[in-house]
Amino acid sequence: MEIDYSVEKPVIEKSPTVISINDAIMRPTAIKADKFFYISLSVALLALTVGAVSLFYTFWYGIGMWGNNRPVGWAFGIVNFVFWVGIGHAGTLISAILFLLRQKWRTGIARFAEGMTIFAVMTAGIFPLIHVGRPWLAGYLFPYPNQHNLWVNFTSPLLWDVFAVSTYFTVSLIFWYIGLIPDLAVLRDKTINKIKKVIYAIFSLGWRHSNRHWNHYEMVYLVLAGFATPLVLSVHTIVSFDFAVSILPGWHTTIFPPYFVAGAVFSGFAMVQNVLIFIRKVFHYEHIITIDTLEKMNKIMILTGSMVGYAYGMEFFIAWYSGSPIETFTFINRAFGDYAWAYWIMISCNVVFPQLFWIKKFRRTIPIMFVIGVFVNVGMWFERFVIVVTSLSRDFLPSSWHYYKPTLTDMGLLIGSFGLFFTLTILFTKSLPVVSIAEVKAVVKGSQPSHNGGH
Amino acid sequence: MEEKIIYGVTALFDSPNNLVKAVKSVNEAGYRKYDVHTSYPIHGMPKAMKLKPSKLAYFALAFGLTGTTLAFLFITWTMSIDYKLVIGGKPFFALPAFIPVIFEVTVLLASIGTVLTMLFYFFKFPNNKHPLHDTEYMQKVSGDGFGICIEAKDNNFDEEKIKSFLSNIGGLNVTSIFYDSVELNHKNKVFEPKFIGFLILVFILISGATYFSLNKLIYMPPFTWMHDQNRLDAQESSVMFGDGFGMRPPVDGTVARNQMPYPYSGHPELALNLVNPSAPTKENYELGKKKFDIYCSPCHGYFGKGDGRLNNQFITPPSLQSEKIRNWKDGQIFHVITEGQNSMPSYAKQILPEERWAIVDYVRVIQRAMNAKEEDIK
């Protein structure tokens, strides 16, 4: 096959006009919701209700309603936390790292991925909060002057986590909002609904598309991308420190930070890819979120999936190479012990299935990539389960060994977390432009001065 | 009709190429107070407009360094100076362990600071009253319009001349933009009933919510702050045990720590030969004084003269300074403290055996002090 590499392939297909981009992206916010929207929203709300009931049980009777008990003190709560924080990482990767790398194909998916980051971090944040048992006392996590003259422990990974996740949420929110301001101004000028116009006017702050402003705006966007890049790497690094800084066999390894970051991007891309497949279909964005874009996401999934697979292998190698019998036992127990079923789900979903993306046809066929994306998310959830539960259930003292089983409340909270995430995502698709209008317009054919004409 | 105040003259252009050309012409014609409006950033526009690179990156650097410094100083002060605690064997100044939080605070402060500076200092937002808003020009720019606006602030501003100039360089829909006189003359009144009502509402909501959450909510389950617990307090009954008592006696044949039973109960003659095990140290005498002052002095008085604070209200005890007691052996005094005598109860439950011996020593001290011999004075 002949490919002409001297011409850049347009990221937006079918050469739409600038104004048609406006209309296509604004359409979902302007028209009445259809049946599909209400059906999907009610499914998400149902899941959210299950979560709310479980949360009520947890608060009313205490976290004794959960399956965790000695020695497995961290179970679903932490598994879900790590899983959802990881989902968020894809958004920042797309919006910040790919921005710094000048990857234009990110324009169509960046806004949506950033939105998913925010919702995923919100969902994640709930779990450590309820895991402390009395979330209304969470103010103690922040260093404020108090009567006891006590300060928080700045040398603890758990406190690093508090700072990392709250900073990550704040910066993601700012980044997202800054990107939204020009689009909100477009909505303000184009909407015919008076109430909506007031709301858009308030949140667009009076943006008037001035090029003197764009000059500063682009600099700030670059600076924020520059900050968000090390930030996103730091967040999952610090989450991995929660484990790696402890001395439990199976947790106490230096490979954790890069391995967690790769895993986070891996699962995040799978989730973004899964949801975008619906978005492009429902809103007819096939020309904006192209098959090429999805294919590039799938390529990133092969890369990160292989990194995760390498980390699994390296953990085993180091367990043997270290000569530590306890370390060796832990890893053999992972693969062949009580939780072998979880381990092999993880291996097959994370290492085996994503390798199918080496075949071009699979990378570009929507049903196949959707199924593989779902597998990746299942696998990544089980990865956190394997790490947290197998290590804890076989600690140093054989008399305290215990087989952890989740309770109904645990399951309800897991379902509820998906409910919360998808409720927010679905509401987002109807209330704000899910694709960045300004960024997509800027890469449409004919939107920029040509080198012969303009200069 | 009052005269309208002009803001500027706008023109639209049909393509990015024409826009860039027009901007260059505007610049060459000597106009400085003008702006270009496009709904997305146009490549090369800052160069065509001769804009300097944004200085916001320096603000980001300044905010970031502020965050680093503040976080470093604060963490060092709390962990290494104000309240030192040994945690996990780390040194008080554990710099590597401080780095994650310092990094996060740096990023947080830099991001928030830069964005707020841009929005509120550089752009002077929120500004929904700008005359360009709600004009056809802005409508067009929000879509696919490429617009230039030359403002009345410019030194060379002349409405008619600029209109023809913009038409000549290819401008379409050349229009003058005026300030909205209603918005210009509108003044927010502080004592507007709506505003006052809003303030009252906010006040009631915030104070009510604060009162409710601090005084009511935290005493409701499940927010009871560990006040209600499924535990037995002393002297409470319990249905768990056959005898209905919540408190349990010790298991038969067991002895609690420091509760060795006194072997000479009822046999003072056997206690006579007990040997005082305590050493004549300062700490021991101080312990004896402390315990004597607490347990013995209320009746016996601070110097054992039998003139305690309970004198005449209660039974009057014998003096410890008497010839008889001074000649007692240490073991006898110990036995009386342990077992009690006449009206004096046993102090075995309150005072540990070694403390009793310390009291015996202290009694010897005050006896000697009140009956000093010649040679003691030297």
Image: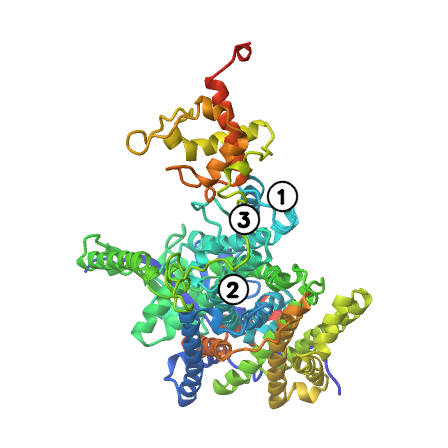
- The image quadrant where one finds the N terminus of chain B is bottom left
Mark 1, secondary structure of its residue: loop
Colour scheme of the picture: rainbow
Q: Residue at x 29, y 29 (%)?
A: B312
Name the residue tied to disc 1.
B93
Q: Amino acid at mark 3?
A: Gly
Task: Identify the disc placed on residue A200.
Answer: none
- Chain that bears disc 1: B
Q: Residue B311 appears at what percent x and percent y?
A: 32, 29
Residue A310 in the figure: left or right of residue B352:
right
Element under disc 3:
helix
Q: Mark 3 Cα within 10 Å, few/some/many (few <14, many 20+)?
A: many
State the CA–CA distance, disc 2 to disc 3: 18 Å
**Residue B30 drawn above or below residue B264:** below
| Relative depth, front residue between A334 and A107 | A334
| Type of amino acid at the residue the image marks with label 1 | Phe
Binning the other alpha carbons within 10 Å of mark 2 as few (below 14), some (14 to 19) or many (20 upward) gives many
Distance, label 3 to label 1, CA atoms, is 19 Å
Instruction: Identify which amino acid the numbered label 2 is placed on.
Output: Ser
Q: CA distance from mark 2 to mark 1?
A: 32 Å
Mark 1, other Cα within 10 Å: few <14 / some 14–19 / many ≥20 = some
Residue that appears at 38% across and 83% down: A31
Q: Specify whether disc 2 shares its chain with disc 1.
A: no
Q: Are marks 3 and 1 in contact (CB under 8 Å)?
A: no
In depth, the one of B324 and B140 nearer the eye is B324
Q: Which percent across, then down, holds residue A329?
A: 75, 71
Instruction: Give coordinates of residue A400: x percent, y percent.
Output: 63, 69
Residue B67 is labelled as: 3
- Is there a contact, CB below 8 Å, between mark 2 and mark 3? no
Q: Which residue is mark 2?
A: A172
Residue A132 in the figure: left or right of residue B96? left
